[in-house]
Image (cartoon, helix red, strand yellow):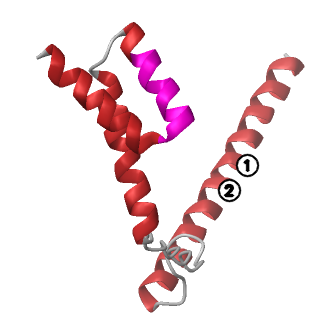
Amino acid sequence: MNDNLDLVSLTNDSSELLQGYIVAAKSKIKKYREERRAGKVTQGTGAKPAAAKKVKKPTPKVKRARKLQGQYLGALKSLTGADRAKVKAVAKEKGVAVAVKIALGMKKGKA
């Protein structure tokens, strides 16, 4: 019988403790909301957003190089096996610009 009383009193104590936590949490929330309305607290952590990085504008030289690279890759896509190998070898030896001209010539010959 003593064990039952201890269990009941323990259950009552734990429920009272839980109720205390709930009341404390609710009062904290209420206080926070009041401060938000008053403008004392900012949303989130209150940290300022990071400044956006400035993207450097590409130079004309870089623009030309990127355009040529795109043309080279596009020309290679339409070629198969041996022709691709030839164009890659030319690109290595004489440069990408020459390789693009050769690749486009090979493509026209097939069509």
Left or right: 13, with 59 as reference point:
right
**Quadrant of residue 106 in the image?**
top left
Find out whether residue 93 is within the magenta segment.
yes
| Residue topped by disc 2 | 20
In the rendered image, the residue lying farthest to the right is 2
Residue occupying image coordinates x 54% and y 70% = 44
Residue occupying image coordinates x 26% and y 21% = 78
Residue type at mark 2: give it: Gly
Q: Which secondary structure, mark 2?
A: helix
Q: Position of residue 14 (x, y in %)?
A: 74, 40
Q: Position of residue 40 (x, y in %)?
A: 54, 90
Instruction: Tell me where the magenta segment starts and ends, as one range.
Output: 84-95
Disc ID at residue 17? 1
Front position in the image: 24 or 102: 102
Residue type at mark 1: give it: Leu
Is 26 rendered above or below residue 50?
Answer: above
Q: Position of residue 35 (x, y in %)?
A: 51, 84
Left or right: 23, with 43 as reference point:
right
Is 19 rendered above or below residue 111?
Answer: below
Question: How far is mark 2 from mark 1, CA to CA?
Answer: 5 Å
Q: Position of residue 41 (x, y in %)?
A: 54, 83
Determine whether label 2 and label 1 are within 8 Å by CB.
yes
